[in-house]
Image: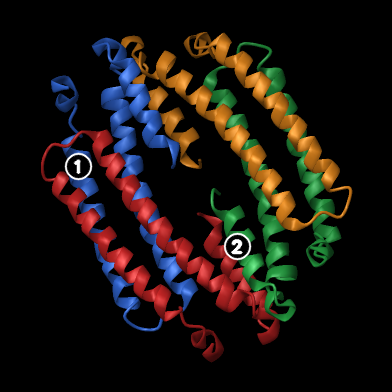
Chain colours: A orange, B green, C red, D blue
Amino acid sequence: MAQKHALHLDPKVRQEARSRLLSAKGHLEGILRMLEGEPYCVDVLKQLKAVQGALDKVGEMILRSHLEHHVASAALRGDTQRMVEELMEVLKYR
Amino acid sequence: MAQKHALHLDPKVRQEARSRLLSAKGHLEGILRMLEGEPYCVDVLKQLKAVQGALDKVGEMILRSHLEHHVASAALRGDTQRMVEELMEVLKYR
Amino acid sequence: MAQKHALHLDPKVRQEARSRLLSAKGHLEGILRMLEGEPYCVDVLKQLKAVQGALDKVGEMILRSHLEHHVASAALRGDTQRMVEELMEVLKYR
Amino acid sequence: MAQKHALHLDPKVRQEARSRLLSAKGHLEGILRMLEGEPYCVDVLKQLKAVQGALDKVGEMILRSHLEHHVASAALRGDTQRMVEELMEVLKYR
């Protein structure tokens, strides 16, 4: 557990993720405003897809950083089994 | 065009979508707070997945309503081609 | 039920789907041959992805045809509820 | 390059993958037979989804084995950058 918490998200990736999530949040607020009016279904679906795409991008950045900084060194630390299990769990429903 | 904008999202679905998106926005704000600290990558990925799942749910509700109220009656209105094209576009990258 | 079976897949789409699935089957046989040797994991994953992409394409063609020929006329036939339910079921895990 | 080809797919996973792909191939042949008749679109879509699910399962097995046997030891071998790049490429369109 202590070991796990030492595996922090890379600060540069964290900043980039924050900035992208702030923008996704703004986009989501835009959809909420649309829903106060009488939007056309497909217009809402398009906006939702754009937000999902932005969240996918953030997930991809964090995944890449995790593979590089934590999974690739699992054999060195001796926690391969746990790293693989939790990663498969997170990738499962992508 | 005028016809298109008459095809509004069903008000009941719209309310439910708003309520779910407000909750997703709260969840997203929680992830933003996580990113002010030093989170573990996989914990962030899990939370992102939860938000994605919530947005999927909203998309699913709106899609169902659109199929039921608008696509199923396309032949009656005579706009089948356009309804199908725009729907395929939106489903494409799901 | 009888009504349901009258909603056949468009013959032209059916031919195109067959031809694409035959090609996907050939591709799958190629992967099976790879697996008789000692392939590199990522090479197998790439080939699997190509087959999945081909199957996605076939699914997309059939979905488009179904929307156009069957779902868009559901209100005319009076089977909207069933058409929407079964479509949502099929789209669910895409 | 020589090093890369030393990273073979685990033999046990390879056998299991072959067996599952043979079954998926049989399923695909069943869909091809359906398409010689006059199937209902949604029935074909359901069968396609089942095959896709089977291929997903195989991909998941191979991915897990790759993470465990090859990615987790990348830092030991010194090929982290390449392992991560090729893995991200393969995960990209999942």
Q: Which numbered disc, 2 or 1, marks the residue closer to the eye?
A: 2
Q: Is residue A38 visible?
A: yes
Q: Residue at x 36, y 55 (%)?
A: C54
Asked whether residue D27 appears in the rendered view, the answer is no
From the viewer's perspective, is D48 left or right of B53? left
Q: Which residue is mark 1?
A: D14
Picture residue at 62% right of the left edge, 43% below the top: B53
Q: Which residue is mark 2?
A: B85
Residue B79 placement: quadrant: bottom right
Looking at this view, name the residue that lies furthest to the bottom. C2
How many numbered discs sit on the rendered protein? 2
Eyeballing the image, is A30 above or below D50? above
Query: Could you say which quadrant of the image residue D32 lies in?
Result: bottom left
Q: Amino acid at mark 1?
A: Arg
Task: Give the x, y percent position of residue C68.
Answer: 58, 73
Indicate the chain on which mark 1 is placed. Answer: D
Q: In the image, is residue A30 above or below residue B59?
A: above
Q: Residues within 10 Å of mark 2 (few under 14, many from 20)?
A: few
Q: Camera-side residue: C11 or D24?
A: C11
| Residue ID at (54%, 14%) | A9
Task: Residue C58 in the image: state x and y as whole percent.
Answer: 41, 63
Which chain does tag 2 point to? B
Q: Residues within 10 Å of mark 1 (few under 14, many from 20)?
A: many
Name the residue at 77% across, 45% down: B20
Q: Amino acid at mark 2?
A: Glu
Indicate which disc residue A60 carries: none
A75 on left or right of C10: left
> Mark 1 falls on what kind of element?
helix
Q: Which residue is outermost to the front?
A: B1
Picture coordinates of residue A63, whole percent (x, y) = 48, 25
User: How far apart are labels 2 and 1 at the CA level?
Assistant: 41 Å
